[in-house]
Image (tube, rainbow, N blue to C red):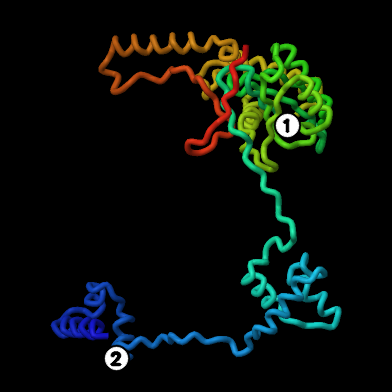
Amino acid sequence: MEERRKVISLINEAHNAGARLDHACKTLGLSLRTIQRWRQNDCGDQRSLIKRHPYNKLSDTQREADLEVLNTQEYAHLAPSQIVPCLADEGRYVASESTLYRILREEKQLAHRHAWKPRKHARPTPLVATAPNQLYSWDISYLPSTIRGRFYYLYLFMDVFSRKIVGWQVYECESSHYAADLLKDICLREGIDKDQVVLHSDNGNPMKGTAMLLMLQELGVMPSFSRPTVSDDNPYSEALFRTVKYVPHYPGYFSSIEVARDYMETFVHWYNEDHRHSRIRFVTPGQRHRGEDKAILAKRHQVYLRAKAHQPERWSSKTRNWNWIDTVKLNPEKGNSKHVVLAEAN
């Protein structure tokens, strides 16, 4: 209070000397309305510090009785918005809907009042591939037909380390039998041994179908699954599908399944052998899968070193990074968490 009176005295002195009142208040970091209020109330603070309780507040006995009703077997699974009408149909009134919500909120029973709780899905095991044919990823995507509401289904398997499409097919439906046959063909073509490859996918029916799981066990392929509804757990397949559908020559719609298969055959050859992938130092997936990328990147590095030696004034720092990428991570953890490093393929 003494400080406020001193402030008013300084402002009055400045105002009497010819200063504008609002400028004097602004200089002290106060608003004109604050000074006017202080003058009217003799610097007093008129805000009440008394905590008032509602006159119609529930007593402790009533509150316990209402909570007991909420937790009965008949109403424990219902929200107050459902409980209040039910009680009214029975000719009973215990409290308003908002009061029941407030009681549950105070008791921390507003969410998941059942005996069970939603299942928490752990993150997939972080994996690190250091060579081709160690870690595969696959998924199914829609290819729209020219008939509205009808789609063809693209099955796509890729090697996460090299980004190469190791297997694909277009079918008219989703089936774990189709996926199992395609996986068996890939393993035979790539010469995959038992316990060599980890196959990552989401939680769709074809991925967890009986035929697919039996084929995984028969081939010795170790499965890895994403969390339900979390597409980020399978990022490589999602990115590949975007490439499939965003290239300039993507037709948009397919008149028949044969046309869809012809398009994918052309796309896969372009992607594996012509497309320089930005995440593997702009070599093609086929070159990296065959181990040719080390020599290509070393040659590019020498080209840049010669260019820098020829005209050093054009270079303000190091040359472009053409170092070979030796590891690729799937679902990495933050920080220094451990990753499962897959054994190098024979």
What is the tally of numbered marks visible in this picture? 2
Circle 1 is placed at which residue position? 141
Q: Is residue 173 visible?
A: no
Question: Is 267 placed left or right of 4 in the picture?
Answer: right
User: What amino acid is found at the position of numbered circle 1 in the picture?
Assistant: Ser
Residue 233 in percent (x, y) is at 63, 36
Residue 208 in percent (x, y) is at 78, 33
Circle 2 is placed at which residue position? 42
Q: Label 2 crowding class (10 Å Cα cut-off): few <14, some 14-19, many 20+? A: few
In the foreground, 107 or 83: 107
Task: Please tell me the numbered disc located at residue 20.
Answer: none
User: What amino acid is found at the position of numbered circle 2 in the picture?
Assistant: Asp
Residue depicted at x 74% and y 60%: 115
Give the mark nearer the N terminus: 2 vs 1.
2
In the foreground, 89 or 23: 89
Quarter of the image for residue 305 reads top left
Residue 186 in percent (x, y) is at 73, 16
Circle 1 sits in a helix, a strand or a loop, which is it?
strand
Residue depicted at x 81% and y 20%: 181
